Image (cartoon, helix red, strand yellow):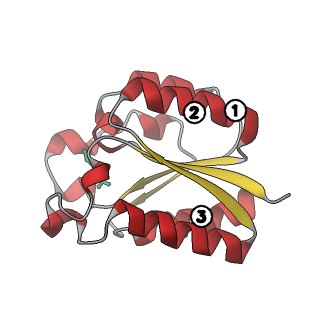
């Protein structure tokens, strides 16, 4: 059975495509999900692609990932900059964790420079648009 990778998305990413398209582009989260699923099949992985606006839901999914996932790709969105709870949950996950940001957070407001999640992430992909998710998956194929 191929390895399962969780791809978790935080608040407001359900509106990807409509939300500040000059920053985040015109692709929707459904487009990202499809391209990840297609690539995963090609490279011998399975994906579980999830989004929530609620911090506790992301924490619960990270707990679930402890049982059945080989790796986590996470775009924690605004929780990147605020959530010790998401960080603590990720610290209990043993496999590789890759953090993805669609925009280049370091070119934006200074509060986006700090990521709680990066304290646990094995790698961070920033500013490459939705292509960042595919790059993260390709890396997972090597390390998960
Ligand atoms: C984001 C960057 C965050 O600062 C922001 O709060 C988001 C999206 C990104 O993908 O570029 O919601 O994680």
Is disc 1 in contact with disc 2, using a CB cutoff of under 8 Å? Answer: yes
Q: Residue lying at the far right in this picture: please name it.
A: 1
Q: Does the closest atom of ligand 1 sit within 8 Å of the Cβ of label 2?
A: no
Residue at position x 39%, y 42% in the image: 76
Marking on residue 118: none
For label 3, the SS is helix
Q: Residues within 10 Å of mark 3 (few under 14, many from 20)?
A: many
What quarter of the picture does the N terminus occupy?
A: bottom right
Query: Which residue does the numbered mark 2 point to in the structure image?
Result: 62
Q: Is residue 118 visible?
A: yes
| Cα distance between the residues tagged 1 and 2 | 7 Å
For label 1, the SS is helix
Is disc 2 in contact with disc 3, using a CB cutoff of under 8 Å? Answer: no
User: What percent of the width, then of the height, locates residue 119?
Assistant: 48, 35
Q: Residue lying at the far bottom in this picture: please name it.
A: 42
User: What percent of the width, then of the height, locates residue 49?
Assistant: 53, 52
Q: Earlier in the sequence, mark 3 or mark 1?
A: 1
């Amino acid at each position: 059975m191929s390895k399962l990778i969780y791809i978790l998305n935080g608040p407001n990413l359900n509106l990807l495509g409509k939300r500040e398209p000059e920053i985040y582009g015109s692709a929707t989260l459904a487009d990202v999900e499809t391209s990840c699923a297609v690539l995963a099949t090609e490279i011998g992985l399975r994906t579980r692609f999830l989004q929530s606006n609620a911090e506790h839901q992301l924490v619960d999914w990270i707990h679930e990932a402890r049982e059945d996932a080989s790796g986590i790709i996470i775009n924690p969105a605004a929780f990147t900059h605020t959530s010790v709870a998401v960080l603590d949950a990720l610290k209990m996950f043993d496999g590789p964790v890759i953090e993805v940001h669609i925009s280049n957070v370091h070119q934006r407001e200074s509060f986006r420079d700090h990521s709680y999640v990066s304290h646990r992430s094995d790698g961070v992909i920033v500013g490459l648009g939705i292509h960042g998710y595919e790059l993260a998956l390709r890396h997972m194929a090597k390390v998960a």
